Image: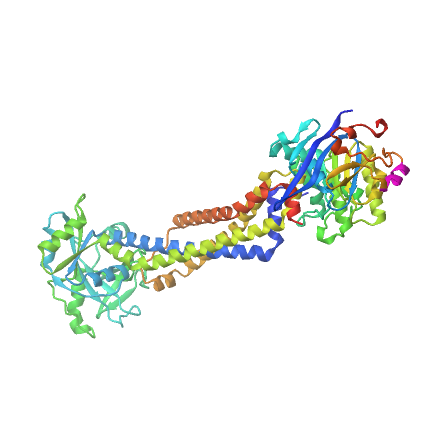
Amino acid sequence: MNRLNLPYIILQNVKRKPYRTAAIALCVMIATGTLFAATVAMRGIQNSLQVGLERLGADVIVVPRGQQITAQEAFISGQPTTFYMDRQIENQVAAIPGVRRASPQVFVQTLTNAKCCVGEFFLIGFDPRNDFTISPWLTTHLNNRDLKPNEIIVGDRILLEPGDTVMFYGSFFTVAGILEPTGMGIDRTVFVPNEGLRQMIAASHVRAEKALTIAPNQISAVLIKVTPGTNPNEVAEQIEMKLDGVQAITATQMILAVSKQFAGLLNIIVVVIAALWLMAFITIALVFTLIVNERQREIALLRAMGARQRFVFRLIVGEALVLTALGGAIGLLVSAIVLFNFQNLFEDRLHAPFLLPTAPEAIFVILILFGVALASGALASLQPALRISRLEPYEAIRQGE
Amino acid sequence: MDSQITLRALSKFYKQGDEKIIAVDNVTLDVRAGDFIVITGRSGAGKTTLLSLIGRLAEPSAGTLAIDGVDLQSLDDAALSALRARKLGFVFQFASLIPTLNVFDNIRLPGLFADKLVDESRVTDLARMVGLGDKLNNRPAQLSGGQRRRVAIARALVNRPAILLADEPTGDLDVDTEKEMLDLLQSLNTQGMTIILVTHNPNLIAYCNRAFRMERGRLIENAPVIASVLSAVEGCEAIPNRHTEIASSRKPLLAMTFENL
C-alpha cells in the first residue's frame, strides 16, 4: 500500500496535464538557464581579471605614451603588440617613492609560420632577476630552478606540452612549463627569459625570414609592485608627472576598462533576464489561477473531507514548487553542460577575459539560482493558493459549477 | 433525548447585485443521533445549501449551529476541519472523486485528514460493499457515473462518521443499484449512523424516519404530495397533510417525535 500524503497528491496533480507541466517547466528552464549563463559569464570575466591580474602581479604597468589601449588589449586578450621605450625608464621608475619592485618586459610578436602553432603569438621577454610574474610560479612549479635561456613557459591556451620544442625566429625553445589558465592574455602568451630573447633577436638576422630589430636598450613595459599601504593610483600619477613619454596603467584601470567594455552588454543581459523572469512569473501566476479555478470543486471536496486551509495552500504552492524545481533543475543542468563543454567557444565569442568559476563557486551559484527559481514559483502561486484556501467550500462548489 | 445536531434560526443570504437572495430562511431543527432524515424539494429550494450549512461548508448569515453541543461558529479552521474529518461524511450531488487518484486512494483519502491510517482491509471491504471490489485500481475516468457515486459513498463511510450528509446520493444510479445503496444507508442508520439526505425524489422518504421538504429556503414538515407515500411506509414518522412551517415557528418542533405532536 503506497503512502497517501500531500507530496503524493501533488505529484499526481503534476502528472495530470503533461503538456501544461512541460510548458511551465520550459518557461522556468529558459529563465533559470539564461540567468545561470549570464551569471557565470559575468563571474567568469571577474574571475579572469582577478586571477589574471594576480598572476601578472603588477599594481601598475608603465608603457610608452599613447600605447595604453594596445597594452591593455595585450594583457587582457593576448593580442600581440609591439612598442618600445628606453631601458632607462626602468631605473627612473624604480626611483619613484612607493615603488617596491620594477620589472621590465620586452614584447615580441611571433611570425604566423612559427613552428608550433597556428596564428601569431605574444612573446614576452622577462628578466628573471627582478620578475614577479613568472618567477613565483617557477618557485612552486619548477622547484625554484632558474630557466635556461632556451626554455620557455607558455600560457594554457597555447597547444604545447612540457618538453615540446618550438622554433621562433629560427631559434629553438623547449617548453619548461604551462601556466594555469587565467582567461586573460597570459593564456596566449609565451614567456622567454631575457637572455634567450636577446639571443633569439640576434639570431633572427641570420636564421629568420624576418629579422627582429629590437635594440638591447629597448624594453616594452615596466611592471611595478608598490610598497604595502601605498595607493597605486598615486604612484601612477607620480610616474606620469615625473617621467616624460610614458603612461602608467593601474590594475584597477584595467578592470574598469573591461567593465566599461561590457557595461552595455551587461545592461542588455539584465533587461533580457528581467523580462524572462517576469514572463515566467506571470505564466506561473496565470496558470495557477486557471488551475485553482478548474479545481475549485475538488478543493471544496477536500475541505469537506476535513482538509485544512493550510493543506490546500500547501497543495497549490507545493505544485508550483515541484514545477519550478523541475524547470529550474533542467535549466541549470543544461546551461551548465553547455557552458562547461563549450567554454572555449564561449570565450572566443565573448572576446573577453573569461575563466569558468571553480566547482564550489558554480555549485553555490546553482544553489542560489535554484532557490530563486523556487521562491519565484512559490510567490507566483501565492495569490491563487491563498484565495482558494480561504474560499468557503460551498462557495467553491457553486463557483465550480 | 439530546439532539446531535442543533440548528437555531439558521439562515443563508446571498447578494446578487442589489437583490438579496435568501437560500435558507430561518431554519430551526433538532436532529437526534440515529435519525434518518430525508429533505425533498425542487431545484433551487435551498436543500443543498442547508446541507452545506449543517456540514459547515458554508457560513450561516444568521442563526446558530451546533454538533454534539459544540457551537460550530466558535471553531477555528483546524477544529472545524478535524470535526468534518472525524464526525461527518459527505456524499455530493456532483461527480466528486479526485481524478488523479484511483478508487482505492479515493476511498481512503479522508483518513489523511483524520490523522489515521486507514486499513487496507477497511478500504477493500467498503469497495466490496458498494460492488466495486474489482475496480480498486481504476481511475474515476474509467468508471461509469453510477460507479463513481458508489465510490463517493464508500469514501464518505471510511472514517466511520457519526453523521452522513448526502446530496442526491442516488442521482446517477439505476433502479437496482439505487435500491442497494439505499438499503445500505438504511443498514448504516440501523447501526446508529445519523443520515441527512436531500433529494428531489420523493420516493426516497420511504427510507427515513423523519421527512421534510424545502420551499424557498424554508424547511417544512412533510408535504401533502408525498403524504400518501409516507403513510404507507412503516417507520417514517410523518403526519399526512400537516403543514407545519418549522422554521417560522421558531419552536424546536422537530426536536420532538411526530408521535408527540
Residue at 55% across, 53% down: A287
Pinpoint residue B185: horizontal percent, then vertical percent: 81, 39
Residue at 38% across, 55% down: A270
- Dividing the picture into quadrants, the one containing residue B209 is top right
Establish if B242 lies above or below A387: above
Residue at 22% across, 53% down: A135
Residue at 23% across, 52% down: A252
Q: Nearer the viewer, residue B197 or B180?
A: B197
The answer to if B228 sits in the magenta stretch is: yes
Pinpoint residue A300: horizontal percent, then vertical percent: 65, 43
Pinpoint residue B225: horizontal percent, then vertical percent: 85, 42
- Dividing the picture into quadrants, the one containing residue A306 is top right
Residue found at the very far top of the displayed protein: B1
Establish if A44 lies above or below B161: below
- Dividing the picture into quadrants, the one containing residue A111 is bottom left
Q: Report the magenta residues as a range.
A: B225-233
On screen, residue A23 versus residue A112, left or right, reads: right
The answer to if A383 sits in the magenta stretch is: no
Residue A146: tell me if it is visible.
Answer: yes
Q: Nearer the viewer, residue A171 or A326?
A: A326
